[in-house]
């Protein structure tokens, strides 16, 4: 089930919506729907979510308001079309990780803590681009052809 934090506009931290997406098979992932009022704001949001003890997140994805936060296909489309990995990701290594992350290193001297890494992905529409470039387009007659008609 989706867990919503700060789902009201102007809620704490000024986000529109935060979802943890365990039902997508990603219990350590959060998606944040947010608009940036200034440069650097998205990075601030990603870092805040990665460091929040109540989320225990390993992956945080920031998306724009035009992306359906409850639709995995829409979120992954934003990642595929709006992310330059060199410019739009943040990685933090050797940091607190979820107790339930099997990829994180257990700390025998400090049970039950684990050490791992986190990633923040900015999949928002960037001001440096024309927003119209991010409108979805489909090939002519997309979805109109049924393969069964030709078999």
Image (cartoon, rainbow, N blue to C red):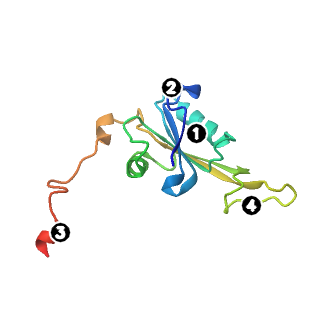
**Disc 3 packing (10 Å; few <14; some 14–19; many ≥20):** few
Q: Residue at x 57, y 35 (%)?
A: 45
Tell me if I can see residue 40 in this picture.
no
Secondary element at image label 4: strand
Q: In the rendered image, which residue does mark 2 sit on? A: 38
Secondary element at image label 3: helix
Q: In the rendered image, which residue does mark 4 sit on? A: 105
Above or below: residue 7 compared with residue 77: above
Q: Residue at x 46, y 48 (%)?
A: 84
Q: Residue 128 sits in which quadrant?
A: top left
Secondary element at image label 2: loop
Q: Residue at x 39, y 42 (%)?
A: 68
Q: Are marks 1 and 3 in contact (CB under 8 Å)?
A: no
Q: Are marks 4 and 1 in contact (CB under 8 Å)?
A: no
For this orientation, the residue located farthest to the left is 149
Q: Say whether disc 3 or disc 2 marks the residue closer to the N-terminus.
A: 2
For this orientation, the residue located farthest to the front is 1
Q: In the rendered image, which residue does mark 1 sit on? A: 46
Gap in angstroms between the C-alphas marked 3 and 4: 48 Å
Tag in front: 3 or 2: 3
Tag in front: 1 or 3: 3
Q: Are marks 4 and 2 in contact (CB under 8 Å)?
A: no
Gap in angstroms between the C-alphas marked 4 and 2: 36 Å
Q: In the rendered image, which residue does mark 3 sit on? A: 147
For this orientation, the residue located farthest to the right is 109
């Amino acid at each position: 089930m989706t867990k919503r934090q700060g789902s009201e506009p102007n809620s704490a931290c000024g986000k529109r919506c935060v979802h943890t997406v365990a039902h997508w098979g990603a219990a350590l992932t959060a998606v944040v729907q947010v608009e940036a009022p200034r440069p650097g704001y998205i990075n601030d949001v990603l870092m805040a979510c990665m460091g929040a003890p109540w989320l225990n997140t390993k992956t945080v994805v920031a998306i724009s308001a035009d992306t359906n936060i409850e639709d995995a296909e829409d979120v992954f489309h934003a990642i595929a079309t709006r992310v330059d990995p060199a410019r739009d990701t943040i990685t933090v290594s050797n940091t607190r990780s979820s107790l339930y992350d099997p990829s994180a290193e257990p700390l025998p001297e400090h049970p039950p803590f684990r050490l791992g890494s986190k990633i923040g992905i900015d999949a928002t529409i960037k001001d440096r681009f024309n927003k119209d470039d991010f409108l979805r387009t489909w090939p002519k007659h997309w979805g109109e052809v049924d393969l069964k008609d030709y078999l």
